[in-house]
Image (cartoon, helix red, strand yellow):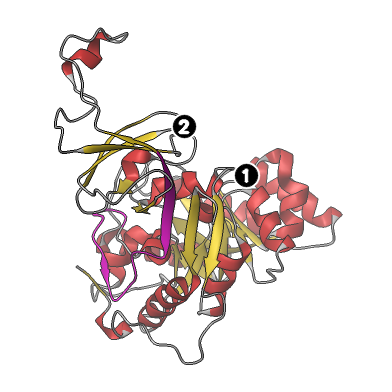
């Protein structure tokens, strides 16, 4: 098979989705599966929806269109504030969108009327992360303006945590969001169908036995795809952490060492050796670099070390004498490395286990044991 590539195990994605959906359903929380890290790949999205996800969430319109072209008919919500230049396309391919700007909502309303549709609006509330959101004290007034518009319907509110400022989604923050949902209904009238507490960073709260209040939705991407808590990087018990494997090919192997008297074009490089000065360590040159992934986000196999990377190459130190030119090396990725690799035009996607097994069970353990470890 060609390299570089990502081997995707759809069975493991299904099992991760099913495990977390079943566990959260006990608390009355449904899962909206986020596909932005996989660039709206339809087969991966289908694996998540087939395993219980209530719908999909995307941040880019191009990915939404890819999902629709790939046959996805489930509800899709745009989770990044819509661009004014895209409102006509958005109302045609997305059932709902997260919004913070009344000007944008008005444009969505006008576009929806032009296309004989009603577009659902979920208002994003600022609760400390300082990325996007309406200030809580302004939420009621904006909600009322949305209710008064034709072409759109206010269906929910949401919040974001642990992205820009690292603010944790605590039980207190979730109570505040529930209170805001109640106050909006009293202020402007409509029942809020969706109160979205946040992303995969919310799982410690959601699985911690706390009262969920009005929170009935989480937008989950990293937890399903990689089986980890994005805040701590800890593995989530009962879930697979290797559904995605990046495969790179060795194009050179040698035992180069760094001459202590070499001249550097960058003076700062003189302070740091780029390769281990150890003849027992073999340097491998891989045909993958910064244009393909985040090399720092790759988990090195046992006995290997990342020495450095450039735009097209990665240099690995290893004690594995069996690796030679033409050999393949396999790496697990963090979320950033996965996003970049999935978007890279030269990285091929290889799907495995594309047929769901009837009554399959998670070999990592039943969902009742789902916990952060």
* Residue 142, visible in the rendered structure: yes
Tell whether position 241 is magenta. Answer: yes
Where in the figure is residue 8, as x and y percent of width and height?
A: 48, 63
Where in the figure is residue 154, as x and y percent of width and height?
A: 61, 62
In this picture, residue 245 sits left or right of residue 70: left
From what the image shows, is residue 172 above or below residue 4?
below
Residue closest to the far bottom: 359
Any mark on residue 312, and which?
2
* Residue 151, visible in the rendered structure: no
Where in the figure is residue 226, as x and y percent of width and height?
A: 37, 61
Q: Residue sitting at 21 percent across and 54 percent down?
A: 302
3D distance between C-alphas at marks 2 and 1? 44 Å
Tell whether position 197 is magenta. Answer: no
Corner quadrant of residue 179: bottom left
SS class, disc 1: helix
Any mark on residue 245, and which?
none
Q: Which region is colored magenta?
A: 230-251
Q: Residue sitting at 54 percent across and 47 percent down?
A: 347
Any mark on residue 102, and which?
1
Count up the numbered dots: 2
From what the image shows, is residue 115 above or below residue 51?
above
Which residue is more in the foreground, 96 or 308? 308
In this picture, residue 50 sits left or right of residue 317: right
Q: Earlier in the sequence, mark 2 or mark 1?
A: 1
Q: Residue sitting at 51 percent across and 75 percent down?
A: 353
Which residue is more in the foreground, 24 or 271? 271
Quarter of the image where the N terminus is located:
bottom right
SS class, disc 2: loop
From what the image shows, is residue 311 above or below residue 75?
above
From what the image shows, is residue 250 above or below residue 255?
below
Where in the figure is residue 111, as x and y percent of width and height?
A: 79, 50
């Amino acid at each position: 098979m060609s390299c570089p590539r990502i081997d995707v195990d759809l069975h493991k994605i299904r099992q991760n989705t099913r495990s977390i959906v079943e566990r959260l359903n006990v608390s009355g929380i449904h899962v909206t599966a986020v596909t932005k890290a996989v660039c709206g790949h339809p087969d991966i999205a289908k694996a998540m929806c087939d395993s219980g996800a209530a719908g999909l969430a995307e941040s880019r319109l191009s990915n939404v269109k890819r999902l629709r072209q790939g046959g996805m008919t489930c509800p899709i919500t745009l989770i990044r504030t819509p661009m004014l230049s895209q409102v006509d396309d958005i109302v045609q391919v997305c059932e709902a969108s997260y919004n913070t700007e009344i000007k944008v909502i008005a444009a969505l309303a006008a576009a929806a009327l032009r296309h004989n549709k009603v577009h659902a609006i979920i208002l994003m509330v600022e609760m400390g992360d300082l990325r996007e959101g309406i200030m809580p004290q302004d939420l009621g007034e904006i909600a009322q303006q949305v209710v008064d518009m034709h072409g759109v319907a206010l269906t929910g509110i949401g919040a974001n945590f642990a992205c820009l400022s690292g603010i944790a989604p605590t039980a207190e923050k979730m109570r505040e969001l529930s209170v805001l949902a109640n106050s909006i209904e009293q202020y402007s009238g409509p029942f809020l169908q969706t109160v979205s507490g946040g992303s995969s960073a919310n799982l410690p709260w959601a699985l911690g036995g706390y009262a969920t209040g009005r929170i009935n939705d989480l937008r989950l991407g990293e937890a399903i795809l990689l089986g980890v808590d994005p805040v701590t990087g800890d593995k989530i018990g009962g879930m697979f952490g290797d559904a995605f494997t990046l495969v790179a090919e060795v194009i050179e192997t040698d035992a180069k060492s760094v001459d202590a008297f070499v001249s550097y074009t960058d003076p700062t490089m003189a302070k740091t050796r780029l390769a281990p000065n150890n003849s027992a360590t073999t340097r491998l040159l891989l045909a993958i670099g910064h244009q393909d992934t985040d090399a720092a986000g790759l988990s090195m196999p046992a006995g290997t070390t990342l020495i450095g990377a450039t735009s097209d190459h990665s240099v690995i130190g290893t004690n594995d004498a069996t690796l030679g030119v033409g050999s393949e090396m396999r790496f697990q990725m963090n979320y950033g490395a996965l996003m970049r690799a999935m978007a890279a035009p030269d990285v091929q996607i290889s799907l495995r286990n594309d047929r769901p097994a009837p009554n399959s069970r998670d070999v990592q353990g039943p969902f009742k044991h789902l916990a952060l470890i």
